[in-house]
Image: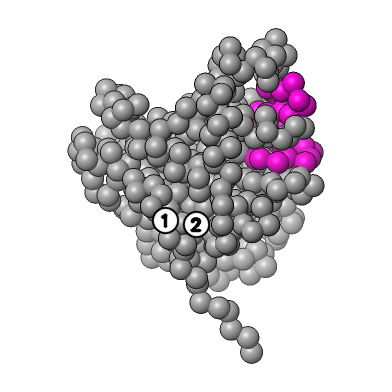
Amino acid sequence: MTTSAPPRPPQTRHGLLPEARHLILPEGIVSTGWPSVREVCRNVGILFDPWQADMNTAILGKNAAGLYAADTVAISICRQAGKTYDIGGLLFADCIINPGTLAVWTAHHFTVTRESFMALKAMAEVPQMRAHVDPDAITTGAGNECIPFRNGSRIMFKARESGAVRGVAKVRRLVLDEAQILSEQAMADLAPTMNQATNPQVILMGTPPKPTDNSEFFKSIRRDALAGASEGLVYVEFSADPGAKWDDKAQRAKANPSYPLRTNDKAINRLHKLLTGPGDFDREALGIWDSDTKTPGIINLDDWDDLAMAAADAPTNGSLAYAVKFSADGERVGAAVALRPDDGPVHVEALGVSLMADGTAPLVQWLAERWRKGHIVLDGKAGAGDLANELVAAGVPRRRIHLVTVDEAITAHAGMLRAIQERDLTHLAQPGLDAAVRAAGKRKIGNAGGWGWASTTPEGDVTSLDAVTLARHAVVAGKRPTGQGRTSGNRTSGNRVGVVA
């Protein structure tokens, strides 16, 4: 029997970044490429504050072979701290020093990617950069943003949500902005872009993730770093103390190394007005991770996790019901299925959430092929009535379609919460559904104490939880439907609508 070695303690700071809560360095650093990078940046008008110089010294640390000691850099830092300027400066220097370098800057959302491009474009257009960048050659078309250098180097800007990074090869530096929205699968898709590059390095930077963020990779990086179990990693974290008051200036300084020199109180006060969801200001302006604070949802996550099962263990025989839920804003539609076995608790599965902009035709076809197995319930003023008509036109008998009433919605939600608390339910472990559960709070329905699910964060989405809630209620309250086989093998992870796939 073999045993794993105990975690190694992280390499000491060597006086670097006293402002940071955590600075964890890889073993084997014998030198740093920072002096030459700093000189190149100074010549093109890019200057750095002391904390940025310290961080860059660590990022550019080299081993005895002259390669980066860290092939991965992870930076947890609040908004408006100067990270785009700093990492942008490193990319410019790398592209100038090493002709033919390809750097790719990505964010999850296109709008964030575009903002970063515009910031770096402004840096590239200063007179000092003319020897290295022709401003007229910069590509500004949406989705094709690129800063080319006269020596053949390029900085490309791509949004991860569109999958635009796939197929890009020989990336020397890959910057992953919004690292708090980065799944392990997304990282697996991105890693091959660097396989053929010389001395590559990936830089992740973001704020602490929301409960609804798909953030497995960023969380695992932090967890391993703090446990001393990481290799080839620089981990930097700036954060205020857990429970810090939002207007405490000493805590602002702990969270934001640019405060108050670059980021003033007015800017942070503005964030406090805008970040109104539970925990949002702590995460995005103070850098506090939820592992140090209370999760805002009302469902006990331990109870929910205990009710999860693998697909192979889920029941297959019993009464079926399908549910479709349209979000209140009319932008999303979620689907779910519930099965009531002859013995045991009701089992639910989310079939995912899709954008209404993608249409509902595939959903109609999918349900039209399965209505004989169980009845269908629809909810949501944004599209339930129209979907019912489409289903009838597709051959589904009107009697097998039911539009949920307000009273039924209230009963469904109360019943779902009770079922979770009393462990009278099972479900698949699905990332999309689990994220909805983590963020689920209550919203008022009617005037008699009724309630439904509501996200506790502005960007959260409980549509998938609403759908399984209605499906459970339908199969419990229904009398007619019987059948075998839930989805005929069409289970999904909950990341997108399986019925549309």
Q: CA distance from mark 1 to mark 2?
A: 7 Å
Residue ID for mark 2: 25
**Can you tell which mark lies on residue 13?**
1
Could you say where residue 237 lies in the image, as x and y percent from the top left?
41, 48
Q: What span is in magenta?
A: 146-174
Q: Nearer the viewer, residue 433 or 459?
A: 459
| Local crowd size for mark 2, using a 10 Å CA cut-off: few (<14), some (14–19), many (≥20) | many
- x and y percentages locating residue 58 in the rendered image: 50, 48
Depth check: 105 or 215 in front?
105
Residue at 57 percent across and 62 percent down: it is 28
Which residue appears at 39% of the width and 37% of the height? 50
Q: Position of residue 299 (x, y in %)?
A: 38, 54
* First along the sequence among labels 1 and 2: 1
Q: Is the residue under label 2 in contact with that under label 1 (CB below 8 Å)?
A: yes
Q: Considering depth in this image, is 292 or 156 the residue closer to the camera?
A: 156
Residue reaching furthest bottom?
1
**Is residue 148 rendered magenta in the image?**
yes
Q: Disc count in the image?
A: 2
Residue 203 position (above or below residue 102) = below
Residue at x 43% of width, y 60% of height: 12
- 480 drawn magenta: no
154 relative to 18, above or below: above
